[in-house]
Image: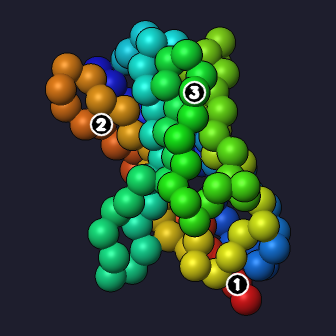
């Protein structure tokens, strides 16, 4: 059974930093693309950053240069380092992977950036 468990959210002032973690189980983690999404109130869930098995990364334009996605295959964990946070980064952040043509999601972790 695939499980994703996020942690690391919280309340931070604008300009601050947070690091999110997502622990995966039930998959051969090192072979999977892992993705962070976010959903702000009243908005659709959108992709933030993604990292493939080989380590290449993709970032949504608004977070380029501020967020860094990384993975530790020995720990079955993907991270999202978020620096220079802005109030518009406030959202619930979700970890995602695809297994046997199905999307799996974590429970989400709230990130709130105050101005």
Q: Which mark is residue 114?
A: 1
Left or right of residue 9, residue 50 in this image: left
Q: Secondary structure at mark 3?
A: loop
Q: Where residue 44 sits: x, y (%)?
A: 30, 69
Residue 59 visible here = yes
- Image quadrant for the C terminus? bottom right
- In whole angstroms, how far apart are the C-alphas of marks 3 and 2? 21 Å
Residue 23 visible here = no
Disc 2 crowd, CA 10 A, few/some/many (<14, 14-19, 20+): some
The residue labelled by disc 2 is 104
Of the image marks 1 and 3, the number of the one nearer the N terminus? 3
Residue farthest toward the bottom in the current orientation of the protein:
115
Of the image marks 2 and 1, the number of the one nearer the N terminus? 2
Q: Quadrant of residue 66?
A: bottom right
Q: Where residue 56 sits: x, y (%)?
A: 57, 27
- In whole angstroms, how far apart are the C-alphas of marks 1 and 3? 32 Å
Q: Which mark is residue 56?
A: 3
């Amino acid at each position: 059974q695939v499980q994703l468990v996020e942690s690391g959210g919280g309340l931070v002032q604008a300009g601050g930093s947070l690091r999110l973690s997502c622990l995966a189980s039930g998959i051969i983690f090192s072979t999977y693309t892992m993705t962070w999404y976010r959903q702000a109130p009243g908005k659709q869930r959108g992709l933030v950053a993604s990292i493939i098995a080989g380590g290449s990364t993709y970032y949504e334009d608004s977070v380029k240069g501020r967020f860094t996605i990384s993975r530790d295959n020995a720990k079955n964990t993907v991270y999202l380092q978020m620096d220079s946070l802005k109030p518009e980064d406030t959202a619930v952040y979700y970890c995602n992977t695809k297994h046997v043509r199905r999307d799996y999601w974590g429970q989400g972790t709230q990130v709130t950036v105050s101005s």
